[in-house]
Image (cartoon, rainbow, N blue to C red):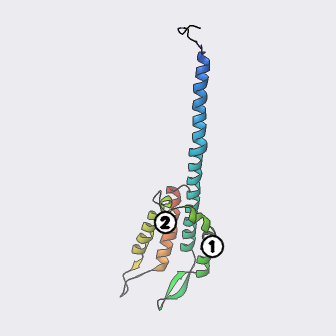
Amino acid sequence: MDDKEHIKIKVNKKVVYLIVFTTIIVFLLSFLIFKYFPEQKRTSDINSYKKQIFDSISCQYGCPLTEQKLQNKTQLLPDQSCVQKCTIDLKSNKNESDKFSDQDLKNDDLFLDVENLVTSCKNSSIDQSLILPSINNTLFFNCVTQDLNNFKIKYPYL
């Protein structure tokens, strides 16, 4: 055999295109299966857990007010048995809370908005007509309950 003799392989263009196309499809499918779908599932799980927290908060603020003694003062506060019922589901999902970090739950402004809403309602419910200004709990709890419902527009997963 002569060293100058070369082996020539002819590859059909269709075969090359098919190999490239197959490689791209395999890559895309791998990305979807191993990256995109798990991230979407995790996001869905986080939003579901945040909805449970939000529903519990809404339920607690919506409990009927009963006269209770707190710090040697009788005042209208959410009924304790109602508040306990509102937290049962959340407490039963302890495994859910262990799966998510604080950062996972703060991927949007939901909890900051809830906190700001409560502060705003608290400030607007202060009864200045008394010698020592105090919060009118009826106004406060009604304000929070009504305004929490508006969050369902801003946060569609609720």
Please give the name of the residue rendered at 52% of the width and 81% of the height, measured from the top-left corner. Answer: 77
Image quadrant for the N terminus? top right
Residue 100: x %, y % from top left: 54, 61
* Label 1 Cα crowd, 10 Å radius (few <14 / some 14-19 / many 20+): few
Residue 19: x %, y % from top left: 60, 25
Q: Which residue is mark 2?
A: 147
Q: Which residue is mark 1?
A: 88
In the foreground, 76 or 17? 17
Residue farthest to the bottom, as pictured: 72
In the foreground, 11 or 48? 11
Residue 71: x %, y % from top left: 46, 89
Q: For the residue marked with disc 1, what is the amino acid? A: Ile
From this view, report whether residue 109 is shown above or below residue 14.
Answer: below
* Label 2 Cα crowd, 10 Å radius (few <14 / some 14-19 / many 20+): some
From this view, report whether residue 34 is shown above or below residue 126.
Answer: above
Please give the name of the residue rendered at 44% of the width and 64% of the height, measured from the top-left corner. Answer: 112
At numbered mark 2, what does the secondary structure look like: helix, strand or loop? Answer: helix
Image quadrant for the C terminus? bottom right
Residue 92: x %, y % from top left: 64, 70
Q: Marks 2 and 1, how far apart in space?
A: 24 Å
The tag earlier along the polypeptide, 2 or 1, is: 1
Closer to the eye: label 2 or 1: 1
Q: For the residue marked with disc 2, what is the amino acid? A: Asp
